[in-house]
Image: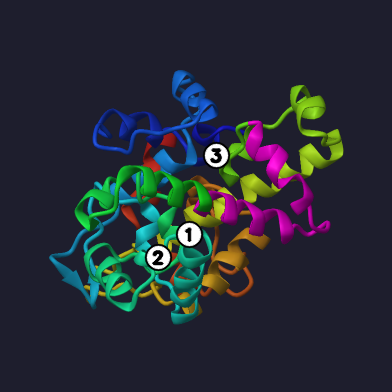
Amino acid sequence: MNLQTRFGPVWGHAQQGAAGLPDLRGARRIEALRRPNTPTMTMWLATLLLAAPKAGKNVAGVPIFGASKSAVRSMPHTAAEQAELVTFLTQIGYPQYATPEFIQKMDEEFAYDSIEDLAFIEEDGDHEELGIPEDHAEAIQTAAHKELMRRFLADLPGGSMERHLNQLHDEGFEEIEDLEDLDEGDVSDTGLSMTEINMLVEQAELHSSRRMLVILLVTHTDKANNSVPFRDPAVHKPLVEAMLAAGVRTLMDIGTLTPGKVEGLSDTDLAKIQSDKRVLAQMNKSEL
């Protein structure tokens, strides 16, 4: 299932105004750009973020999420994840960027506080303002993607597939979202069976939907009191998992939910989420 199918027709319109989006790299992402109906998840997330409600310079302590930054930056991270970031930078050979002073600089200037944030450091161009050479930024970004893929493969519900990490990476499947492009033509090149490929595609699509829901919630602004009610992970994570368990995969799915349908999601919270302009945009376009 491509992203236009999953996230609805708003992609086609949002893409037209996305000239400032990162220059995507990698053969498979370049190929995706040649297929207008299959935008990459990185581009979709950036587009979703561009559409996020803005409410002044600061909303309840949450900075405005600029159009030039990755959608991932909208998500709060823990002190433990920042500690992982320090260890990661040291382990991959860049201890100069793991000092307390540099970590604080990355956090304060660009909200970099997790390995996940590093997956966009070269694409977003933040390395230039941080004083990180481009070759270092590229190496850090590649290592971050590989680590995120390793964690994804190691934590699959059917058991770890971490043993396939290097082969998948060598074949151009560098990001989790790339796995959605796996098909029967990749059996011989990757050493995967069709059963494994189907499972990876399904889990990658679930990962994309989870990410979409998280970003939707953490960037949702309640206009009634100018707050961001779902930003706290302790608040949004249970809601995201509840919606996924109920079969929600798209913004359209959210818009068609009825009160009481999702266990763990109150009618009040459902109404707030359905009032988000990005959800309403999907519903309005579906009626045209």
Q: Which residue is mark 3?
A: 6
The answer to the question of whether label 3 and label 2 lie on touching residues, with beta carbons closer than 8 A, is: no
Mark 3: secondary structure: helix
Residue at horizontal 55 percent and vertical 60 percent from the top: 258
Q: CA distance from mark 2 to mark 1?
A: 26 Å
Residue at horizontal 45 percent and vertical 47 percent from the top: 139
Residue at horizontal 17 percent and vertical 71 percent from the top: 58
- Please state the horizontal and vertical placement of residue 50, each as a whole percent of the image: 28, 47
Quadrant in which residue 113 is drawn: bottom left
The answer to the question of whether label 1 and label 3 lie on touching residues, with beta carbons closer than 8 A, is: no
Q: Main secondary structure of the magenta part?
A: helix
Q: Amino acid at mark 2?
A: Met
Q: Is residue 66 above or below residue 8?
A: below
User: In front: mark 1 or mark 3?
Assistant: 1
- Please state the horizontal and vertical placement of residue 176, each as a whole percent of the image: 59, 46
Q: Classify 10 Å Cα crowding around label 2: few (below 14), some (14-19), many (20 and above).
A: some
Q: Which residue is mark 2?
A: 75
| Among numbered discs 3 and 2, the one appearing first in the sequence | 3
Residue at horizontal 54 percent and vertical 28 percent from the top: 28
Mark 1: secondary structure: loop
Q: Is 230 situated left or right of 213 in this image?
A: left
Q: CA distance from mark 1 to mark 3?
A: 39 Å
Mark 2: secondary structure: loop
Q: Which residues are magenta?
A: 144-171
Q: Which residue is mark 1?
A: 93
Determine if the magenta segment contains residue 150. yes
